[in-house]
Each structure stands twice: as structure tokens, then as C-alpha cells.
Amino acid sequence: MPARSKEQRSDERKEVREVVELIPDQNRLLALSFDVSSSGVQFRTREPLRMWIRMSSLGEAFVREAELAWVRKEVDGSMIYGLRLID
């Protein structure tokens, strides 16, 4: 993964390779589509997509609510997601 500039990060990062369990928030969320094709749809929401995240980090298990901050598709077709943890 390419290095990101420190200006974009407000907190110190630690490389941790652990299994992450994502539990979608079951609340209803309305969106407005603005670009549709036979292979996908682009939409806008007033609120971020939220979910619960369960994982271990440095030997400590935790469950936190998170919101989708960004998504990037890699050359190999895999997806990388950035989640913002909610206090």
C-alpha cells in the first residue's frame, strides 16, 4: 500500500494484520442516485454509511461503531476501505 502523507493523518498509525468482522448497521438509510449504468450506481447520502466493527488490535479485542470514510479499488480488483471509528 502506498505511503500517505502525515498531513492527512491526525492519529499515529500502527500496522496490524488481523481479521476484521463487519456488522452492517440495520437502520434504514436513504440515498439519491445520480449516475446509473448496467454495472453499478453512484449515489449520495446525507449521512455516512455506518457499521459495527469487531477485531483485535495489539492483543486487545474491541467492538466499535464506524463509518465509511473512503474506498479505493486496486489494480488487482481488490477493494481497500477506510473506516472512521466513532466515539
Image (spheres, rainbow, N blue to C red):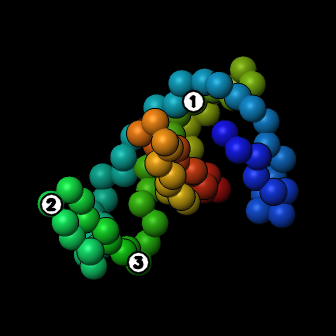
The disc label shown at residue 46, or none: 3
- The residue that appears at 54% across and 24% down in the rendered structure is 19
Do tag 2 and tag 1 residues touch (Cβ < 8 Å)? no
Label 3 vs 1, first from the N-terminus: 3
> Disc 1 on helix, strand or loop?
strand
Q: Dot 2 corresponds to which residue?
A: 38
- The residue that appears at 55% across and 37% down in the rendered structure is 63
* Residue density around tag 1, few if under 14, some if 14–19, many if 20 or more, within 10 Å: some
Please state which of the two labelled residues, at mark 2 or mark 1, is closer to the viewer: 2
Please state which of the two labelled residues, at mark 3 or mark 2, is closer to the viewer: 2
Percent of width and height locating residue 74: 50, 43
Q: Which amino acid does the dot numbered 3 rest on?
A: Arg
The disc label shown at residue 55, or none: 1
Asked if residue 21 shows in the view, the reply is yes
Drawn side of residue 67 relative to residue 49, left or right: right
Looking at the image, the residue that sits furthest to the top is 59
**Alpha-carbon span between mark 3 and mark 1:** 28 Å
**Alpha-carbon span between mark 2 and mark 1:** 35 Å
Q: Which sits in the foreground, 2 or 28?
A: 2
Q: Which amino acid does the dot numbered 1 rest on?
A: Met
Looking at the image, the residue that sits furthest to the front is 75
* Residue density around tag 3, few if under 14, some if 14–19, many if 20 or more, within 10 Å: few
- Based on the displayed image, in which of its 4 quarters is residue 9 positioned? bottom right
Looking at the image, the residue that sits furthest to the left is 38
Which quarter of the image is occupied by the C terminus?
bottom right
Label 3 vs 2, first from the N-terminus: 2
